Image (cartoon, rainbow, N blue to C red):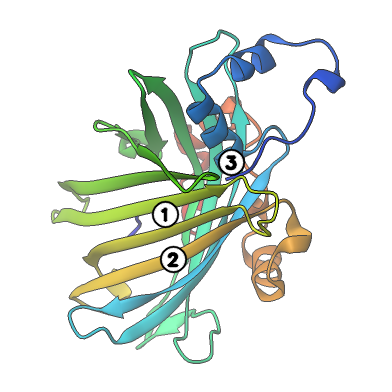
């Protein structure tokens, strides 16, 4: 059972002006509403790929017993539009593995069932700001199973103190799954973007989910929780996570290069990659 983990921040990397003449893309970014610009810069960077590392756990409901740990990451980049005011495109892919709740080792088998990591070869997220509200639509899947999840209510933008921007996205999922059952879950993302100069890690996120266990883990409901933070390169990955990624998920260490790659994946090239 796959779910959106999105999963998924930074102060602008310096000096667009120093890089040369202002292009349509940088002009669109500079003229964007501050909340939109700060959000996109934080979540997807300003050009070079960025990564969000995550760890957390899966807890039985209602007992609270920790069933599994979770680790993973996403890799992201951004395309600003040529025309000011048009939608901003966030290109990302993400993967998450389940771990033993005691040893922390990545699980490949549980009670005789194979355990596959969650692996999205791509997600295309479209950001816009309308009437003072921030929206982010998600496109994912392949072939006839491409999904477009609309941000109907928008994401809630706020502040904590003088130098922390908060962005909250609540997702209520209710749709038929290929096996004939109704897929239902609730997820909530709280991003914290700290702009103070004395903050060691200015990009943070907390994610919660209430929904069913993955099929290999049995029946019942569970609470999922991940904490996430941004890194700028592989040298900032936790060593064990990077070792696993290089061995099992090297494709996920880079975001999609462009829209052409995403469209190719949607046409079928992603079918096998969902679990690779």
Residue 182 visible, this orientation: yes
Dot 3 or dot 1, earlier in sequence: 1
* Residue position for label 1: 5
Q: Quadrant of the N terminus?
A: bottom left
**Percent position of residue 143, x then y:** 38, 35
Q: Is residue 188 left or right of residue 44?
A: left
Circles 1 and 2: CB distance less than 8 Å? yes
Q: Quadrant of the C terminus?
A: bottom right
Q: Residues within 10 Å of mark 3 (few under 14, many from 20)?
A: many
For this orientation, the residue located farthest to the front is 162
Which residue is pictured at 57% across the width and 26% down the height? 259
Q: Residues within 10 Å of mark 2 (few under 14, many from 20)?
A: many
Which residue is pictured at 56% across the width and 28% down the height? 37
**Percent position of residue 142, x then y:** 41, 39
Q: Is residue 151 above or below residue 164?
A: above
State how far apart marks 1 and 2 are (Cα).
9 Å
Q: Is residue 37 above or below residue 238?
A: above
**Percent position of residue 101, x then y:** 44, 86
Dot 3 or dot 2, earlier in sequence: 3
State how far apart marks 3 and 1 are (Cα).
17 Å
* Discs 3/2, front: 3
* Residue position for label 2: 226
Residue 16, picture quadrant? top right
Q: Is residue 99 left or right of residue 1?
A: right
């Amino acid at each position: 059972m796959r779910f959106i983990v999105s999963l998924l921040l930074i102060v602008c990397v310096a000096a667009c002006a120093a890089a040369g003449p202002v292009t349509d893309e940088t002009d669109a970014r500079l003229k964007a509403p501050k909340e939109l610009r700060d959000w996109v810069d934080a979540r997807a960077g300003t050009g070079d790929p960025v990564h969000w590392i995550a760890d957390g756990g899966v807890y039985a409901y209602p007992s609270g017993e920790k069933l599994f740990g979770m680790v993973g990451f996403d890799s992201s980049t951004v395309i600003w539009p040529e025309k000011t005011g048009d939608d901003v495109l966030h290109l990302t892919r993400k993967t998450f593995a389940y771990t033993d709740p005691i040893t922390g080792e990545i699980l490949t088998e549980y009670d005789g069932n194979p355990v596959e990591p969650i692996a999205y070869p791509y997600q295309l997220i479209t950001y816009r700001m309308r009437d003072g509200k921030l929206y982010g639509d998600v496109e994912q899947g392949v072939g006839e199973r491409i999904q477009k999840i609309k941000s109907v209510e928008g994401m809630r933008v706020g502040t904590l103190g003088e130098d922390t921007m908060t962005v909250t996205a609540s997702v209520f999922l209710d749709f038929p799954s290929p096996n004939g059952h109704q897929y239902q879950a609730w997820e909530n993302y709280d991003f914290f973007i700290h702009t103070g100069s004395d903050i060691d890690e200015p990009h943070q996120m907390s994610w919660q989910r209430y929904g069913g266990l993955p099929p290999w883990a049995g029946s019942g409901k569970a609470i999922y929780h991940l904490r996430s933070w941004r890194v700028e390169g592989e040298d900032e990955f936790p060593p064990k996570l990077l070792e696993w990624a290089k061995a099992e998920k090297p494709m996920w260490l880079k975001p999609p290069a462009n829209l052409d790659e995403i469209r190719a994946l949607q046409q079928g090239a992603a079918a096998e990659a969902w679990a690779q």
